[in-house]
């Protein structure tokens, strides 16, 4: 497992083992007894209704389902119960003394129903990112589905199943409504003269909008020098840059196309016409000074006669300018569109409004003729094309000029779009992503990310709660994804997924590969797998990860981590053909852990400029490899107290990726990191109070000096993953080998495992991490190997007894200890694992540290943004225990040092803290004896003289301590760090410190 890690670095981090585990094994005699008892009754119903999860043949170990493991009393259950309260009561469920358990689900469904044209029950929107016109709406509802499914599977409490089934059924109704709307022929509506066409626009501020438009024949204005284009327009809203028409050549870069002519409904003071053969900078423009009024019909015309262009509004000249370019200069234009801009349109909106009587004349009309056409479109012959929109409903737009230049309406009608679509907004964002629209207020916001959350929620409703309706809905959604992406060229897909935020797709590839694994229809399964592979990010990150080439600096953490869990799902479908997917995922994980990992398990944050690298002020991006201290210093100087990196979504997905890699390779190092992230960042991300209106979880849990936790986040991404984090704590406590011969105990969390297939019930009683031991009772009979993870931090011992008898087996930190025996009902395993205090350095600065108690990082409470400075070595005794410098307080895991309280992050109170401090050990001091020699020199490992000496602790005697000082000082003198006289002073001080170093 070693990826650019020395053993010294591994030990110092306390996070990873450098190679495959050495396993201590104990064989024991057999004992006969009755099989194990059943699990808790509260989860029995959930277990009975749950379909089997898809198990990959490549997994060496397999998880148990949520319903097989129930939580016992501990801080984990306390945190979970607070989210269960939110799941029950959000809405709120009780108003004026009347309970309505559908109010919360109805609020989650509101945007889906509005977009599908259904009754939204009069409920209020969720708000935040789930506002009625928000471009990420629907994502939080998907997380809420998962919350309900996990809550049901964990507790069997009927209210969660009822809410879940209600939401699933309603989403199915929305999907059916979308399908019915898509099957309709494009309608014609009442117009200015007869009937008109309706353009729905883009959903940016409009709530709905299908990004529909009309395509006219290629070269429709070719060869024209003078011309007139006129139309009646009734804008629903006055959108800057929304196009009446745009004729030209699609671009192939993020810039506008170089050659085009267009007319907008509004720019600056009114409509604008522009023509260019050199892009936006070379546009020749005519700007109208008369603005159109939203909701009112207006006649707009652009006339070019000679070198003069004139814009008319309602038959009256409203602006003019010089035009030396004409359509003939554009050549034969391939893209001639009504209601939309050239490709790539970037952040320009589609037209939202009605259009009638669109006419193209092959000459420049005079003012009287324009006024006459405004009064009566038939007053002049539109000799190029004339679209009256009086034809029957459908996609064909008839050319009434007799030239046969018929147009085609492209929208969410006429059966053009797959009936499996389901979202809380229209397909417009997906369409615009395919045109490389960027992330912004007028652009788009990660449509496939939102889709992933909805699909994941439905998949969880199926797997965790047995909802066949959910499977039906999500399968059709998978068909819809395939229908869209299967026709997008690979080059375009690569570019889409490389777009910052806009191209973020969450774990959509995971969802599609999951569907491929469970679908019994070979053709549909193959389509879903092809759709999963369409999400391959092959422009930058995937090929770099495959080559083990680190390109993560400055890219979005949460945009990329879940992609690699999806790659593992693809790998599992055919491990030989898809081997590169596993390699990429494994390499990617090792680029983060430990190289970008903060002590509480998070990654990402702001960082300063360096040669060849600009500063980054976005806390959601990966910091440079090996950059911990430098990022913290930059954040301390520039970031807000609640925004300094450590995005909770990112840790959620890092733990998920870690767990899935572990299934393929049960190296305990994965679980050491998993425990770190779970017991520090995730457990610390939930406030310790109940709320029916808000999940009360963090967005960021920053580690810089004086940072705080901003609890809340209803509607945000981290609010969504936060709902999931705290209702699935049991998912990785236990695992089983592929042949079911071995039980892995990975986490020491109070819980009961019902392993009915083996006839075993395993109950773990502990208040870990507020307790430094656990008791595991095995009820059942028969042979079974039980592997107990020996945490990498367990340096003060890991002692095991079975039925009171000590186990004589090696318990090396960072490995598994195996108990291989025939078990009898009531057999009891007791494990003691004293935590002990230890420090962990930042990778890039040996003076910047965190202090731990066992697995728990202990931030120092203080509001100052200045670094805390701690000195420990003068307080140490021969045993080297930091307890001599850090006072234990009454509460478990609470300590004090240097007049600061040290408190674990699982205490969910928003006090300012310092996860890191600066270690200041300026002189070689033993107890109260000061040698007068500087301790500031460091060796190639970044260690000071005192670091080297105390690394050998504990010392059985003062003589052994002095011998260690002699050895290290000799090395220091040989390296030129100590002159001979200073070495002598150090030796004298060590000898004189015997009394001070004696434990007292």
Image (cartoon, rainbow, N blue to C red):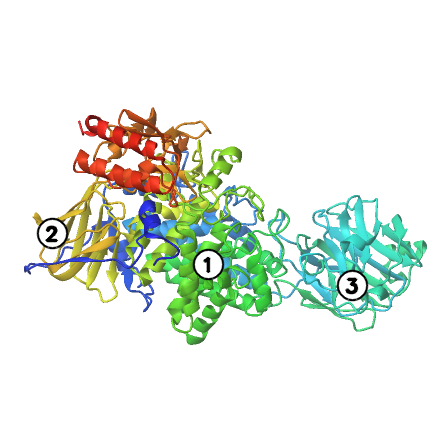
Give the label on residue 388, or none: 3
Q: Residues within 10 Å of mark 1 (few under 14, many from 20)?
A: many
**273 or 5: nearer the viewer:** 5
Coordinates of residue 632 in the picture (x, y in percent): 46, 38
Coordinates of residue 127 in the picture (x, y in percent): 52, 41
Q: Please state, as top left, top right, bottom left or bottom right, where the C terminus lies in the image.
A: top left
* Label 3 vs 2, first from the N-terminus: 3
Give the label on residue 807, or none: 2
Give the label on residue 639, or none: none
Work out whether residue 709 can be spotted: yes
Element at label 3: loop
Taking the image as shown, residue 763 lies to the left or right of residue 551, namely left
Query: Based on the displayed image, in which of its 4 quarters is residue 293 positioned?
Result: top right
Q: Say if mark 1 contacts mark 2, CB within 8 Å.
A: no
Element at label 1: helix
Residue drawn at point x = 62 percent, y = 64 percent = 413
* Label 3 vs 1, first from the N-terminus: 3
CA gap, disc 3 and disc 2: 89 Å
Taking the image as shown, residue 224 lies to the left or right of residue 185, namely right
Residue drawn at point x = 31 percent, y = 48 percent = 11
Coordinates of residue 31 in the picture (x, y in percent): 5, 59
Mark 1 — residue?
563
């Amino acid at each position: 497992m070693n990826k650019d890690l020395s053993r010294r670095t591994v030990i110092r981090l306390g996070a990873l083992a450098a190679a495959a585990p050495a396993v201590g094994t104990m064989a024991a005699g057999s004992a006969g007894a009755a099989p194990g008892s059943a699990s808790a009754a509260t989860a029995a119903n959930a277990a009975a209704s749950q379909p089997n999860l898809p198990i990959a043949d490549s997994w060496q170990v397999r998880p148990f389902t949520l319903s097989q493991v129930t939580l016992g009393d501990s801080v984990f259950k306390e945190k979970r119960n607070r989210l269960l309260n939110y799941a029950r009561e959000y809405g709120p469920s009780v108003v004026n003394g009347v309970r309505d358990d559908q109010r919360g689900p109805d609020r989650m469904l509101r945007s889906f129903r509005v977009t599908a044209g259904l009754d939204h029950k009069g409920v209020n929107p969720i708000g935040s990112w789930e506002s009625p016109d928000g471009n990420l709406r629907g994502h939080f509802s998907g997380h809420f589905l998962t919350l309900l499914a996990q809550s049901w599977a964990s507790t069997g409490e009927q209210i969660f199943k009822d809410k879940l089934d209600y939401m699933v059924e309603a989403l199915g109704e929305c999907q059916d409504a979308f399908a019915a709307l898509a099957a309709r022929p494009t309608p014609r509506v009442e117009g200015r003269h007869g009937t008109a066409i309706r353009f729905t626009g883009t959903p940016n501020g409009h709530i709905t909008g299908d990004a529909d438009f009309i395509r006219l024949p290629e070269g429709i204005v070719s060869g024209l020098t003078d011309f007139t284009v006129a139309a009646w327009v009734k804008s629903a809203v006055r959108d800057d840059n929304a196009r009446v028409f745009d004729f030209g050549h699609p671009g192939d870069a993020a810039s506008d196309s170089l050659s085009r002519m267009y007319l907008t409904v509004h720019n600056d003071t009114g409509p604008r016409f522009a023509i260019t053969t050199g892009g936006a900078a070379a546009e020749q423009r005519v700007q109208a000074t008369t603005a159109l009024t939203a909701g009112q019909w207006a006649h707009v015309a652009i006339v070019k006669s000679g070198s003069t262009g004139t814009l008319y509004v309602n038959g009256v000249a409203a602006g003019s300018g010089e035009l030396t370019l004409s359509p003939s200069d554009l050549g034969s234009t391939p893209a001639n569109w009504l209601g939309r801009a050239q490709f790539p349109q970037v952040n320009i909106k589609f037209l939202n409004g009605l259009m009638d009587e669109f006419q193209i004349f092959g000459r420049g009309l005079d003012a009287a003729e324009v006024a006459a056409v405004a009064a009566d479109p038939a007053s002049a012959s539109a000799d190029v094309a004339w679209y009256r929109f009086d034809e029957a409903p459908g996609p064909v737009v008839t050319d009434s000029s007799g030239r046969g230049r018929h147009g085609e309406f492209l929208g969410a009608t006429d059966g053009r779009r797959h009936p499996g679509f389901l979202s809380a907004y229209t397909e417009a964002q997906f369409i615009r992503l395919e045109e490389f629209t960027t992330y912004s207020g007028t652009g788009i916001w990660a449509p496939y990310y939102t889709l992933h959350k909805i699909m994941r929620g439905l998949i969880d409703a199926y797997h965790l709660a047995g909802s066949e309706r959910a499977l039906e809905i999500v399968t059709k959604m998978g068909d819809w994804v395939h229908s869209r992406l299967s026709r997008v060229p690979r080059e375009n897909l690569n570019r889409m997924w490389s777009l910052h935020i806009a191209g973020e797709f969450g774990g959509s590839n995971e969802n599609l590969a999951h569907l491929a694994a469970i679908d019994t229809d070979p053709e549909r399964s193959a389509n879903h797998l092809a759709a999963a592979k369409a999400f391959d990010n092959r422009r930058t990150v995937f090929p770099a990860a495959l080559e083990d080439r680190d390109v993560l600096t400055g890219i979005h953490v949460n945009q990329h981590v879940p992609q690699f869990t999806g790659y593992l799902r693809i790998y599992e479908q055919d491990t030989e053909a898809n081997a590169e997917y596993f390699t990429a995922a494994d390499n990617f994980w090792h680029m983060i852990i430990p190289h970008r990992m903060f002590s509480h398990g998070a990654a990402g944050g702001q960082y300063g400029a360096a040669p060849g690298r600009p500063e980054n002020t976005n806390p959601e991006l990966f910091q440079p490899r090996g950059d911990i201290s430098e990022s913290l210093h930059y954040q301390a100087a520039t970031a807000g107290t609640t925004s300094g990196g450590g995005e909770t979504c990112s840790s959620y997905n890092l733990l998920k990726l870690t767990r899935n890699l572990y299934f393929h390779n049960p190296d305990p190092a994965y679980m050491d990191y998993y425990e770190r992230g779970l017991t520090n960042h995730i457990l610390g991300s939930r406030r310790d109070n109940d709320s029916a209106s808000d999940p009360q979880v963090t967005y960021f849990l920053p580690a810089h000096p004086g940072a705080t936790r901003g609890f809340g986040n209803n509607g945000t991404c981290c609010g969504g993953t936060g709902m999931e984090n705290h209702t699935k704590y049991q998912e990785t406590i236990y695992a089983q080998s592929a042949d079911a011969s071995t039980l892995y105990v990975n986490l020491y969390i109070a819980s009961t495992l019902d392993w009915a297939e083996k006839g075993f019930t395993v109950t773990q009683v502990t208040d870990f991490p507020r307790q430094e031991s656990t008791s595991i009772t095995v009820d059942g009979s028969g042979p079974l190997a039980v592997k107990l993870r020996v945490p990498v931090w367990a340096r003060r011992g890991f002692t095991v007894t079975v039925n009171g008898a000590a186990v004589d087996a090696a318990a090396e930190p960072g490995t598994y200890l195996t108990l291989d025996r025939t078990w009898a009902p009531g057999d009891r395993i007791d494990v003691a694992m004293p935590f002990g205090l230890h420090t962990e350095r930042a990778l890039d600065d040996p003076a910047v540290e965190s202090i731990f108690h066992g697995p728990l990082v202990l931030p120092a409470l203080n509001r100052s943004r200045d670094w805390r400075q701690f000195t420990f070595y003068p307080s140490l005794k021969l045993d080297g225990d930091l307890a001599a410098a850090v006072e234990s307080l009454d509460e478990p895991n609470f300590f004090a040092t240097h007049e600061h309280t040290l408190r674990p992050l699982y205490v969910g109170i928003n006090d300012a803290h310092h996860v890191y401090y600066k270690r200041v050990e300026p002189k070689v001091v033993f107890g109260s004896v000061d040698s007068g020699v500087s301790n500031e020199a460091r060796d190639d490992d970044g260690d000071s003289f005192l670091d080297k000496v105390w690394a050998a602790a504990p010392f059985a005697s003062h003589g052994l301590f002095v011998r260690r000082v002699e050895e290290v000082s000799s090395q220091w003198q040989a390296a030129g760090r100590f002159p001979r006289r200073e070495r002598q002073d150090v030796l004298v001080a060590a000898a004189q410190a015997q009394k001070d170093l004696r434990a007292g």
